[in-house]
Amino acid sequence: MIIRCIIVEDEPVSQDVLKKYIADCPNLKLIEVCNNAFEANDALVNHEVQLMFLDINMPRLSGMKFYKSLSNPPFVIFTTAYPEYALEGFEVDAVDYLLKPFPFERFLKAVNRVVERLKKQDNNLLPEKFILLKADKKIHKINIADLLYLEAMGDYVKVFFSDKHIIVHDTLQGLQSQLPQQPFFRVHKSYIIATEKFSYIEGNMVQIGEKSIPIGLTYRNDFLKLIKD
């Protein structure tokens, strides 16, 4: 099980410790190192992230306030030098709370807790076969297998099938949270595709049916790795 994670930490020394610990864990893949909550928010939008190592004490916006602001947050392990934040951390269902400076053994214990939660999550969820989307004053039952791609249009999203499309009043990020992670992937700030449905990639475009969809620079490496694995 590979867990995709980010570091959200404003202290370079603490960043280096976490980077070393993560490199020593074969089941962790570091996606990005963020210096503040705003960079972390961009990372969550642009990448599939399952775990955050999140410092609580940061300038402008604290890690705790940032985490509480997220509508669909990944698992979080809080890191801080201040023990008084521990209770608040567990109140938001943090996986663990690491008090700086912490040894690798304590870090590994926290990571193992994430692994156990992910295993329970996988065992408890049945395969999703359909979702319900509201469009044209109707609630549509959409079979997951019929979806080709989704295209953002401001506060609306076009949801495309092989022979038609519907327009949903929602954001692309909002709909992404309703879809299973596989086989869907965000390849551009304006597009999510069903990875099983593309026919070929040419340059920075991916072809699905008759539609050529751009692959954003920030998504390209993750997308290529996904289809190669």
Image (cartoon, helix red, strand yellow):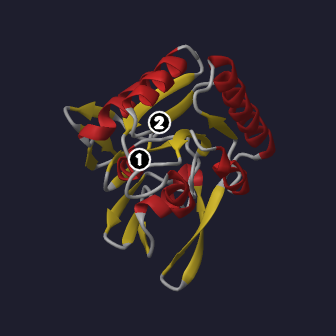
State which quarter of the image contains the N terminus: top right
| Residue 136 vertical position relative to residue 13 in the rendered view, above or below | below
Q: Residue at x 41, y 51 (%)?
A: 37
How crowded pointer 2 is (Cα within 10 Å; few <14, some 14-19, many 20+) is rated as: many
Q: Which residue is mark 1?
A: 40
Identified by mark 2, the residue type is: Ile
Q: Residue at x 59, y 77 (%)?
A: 139
**Secondary structure of the residue carrying numbered label 1:** helix
Residue 197 percent across, percent down from the top left: 44, 41
Nearer to us in this view, 189 or 35: 35
**Secondary structure of the residue carrying numbered label 2:** strand
Residue 54 percent across, percent down from the top left: 52, 42
Q: Residue at x 75, y 34 (%)?
A: 119
Which residue is most to the left?
203
Residue 116's disc is none
Identified by mark 1, the residue type is: Ala
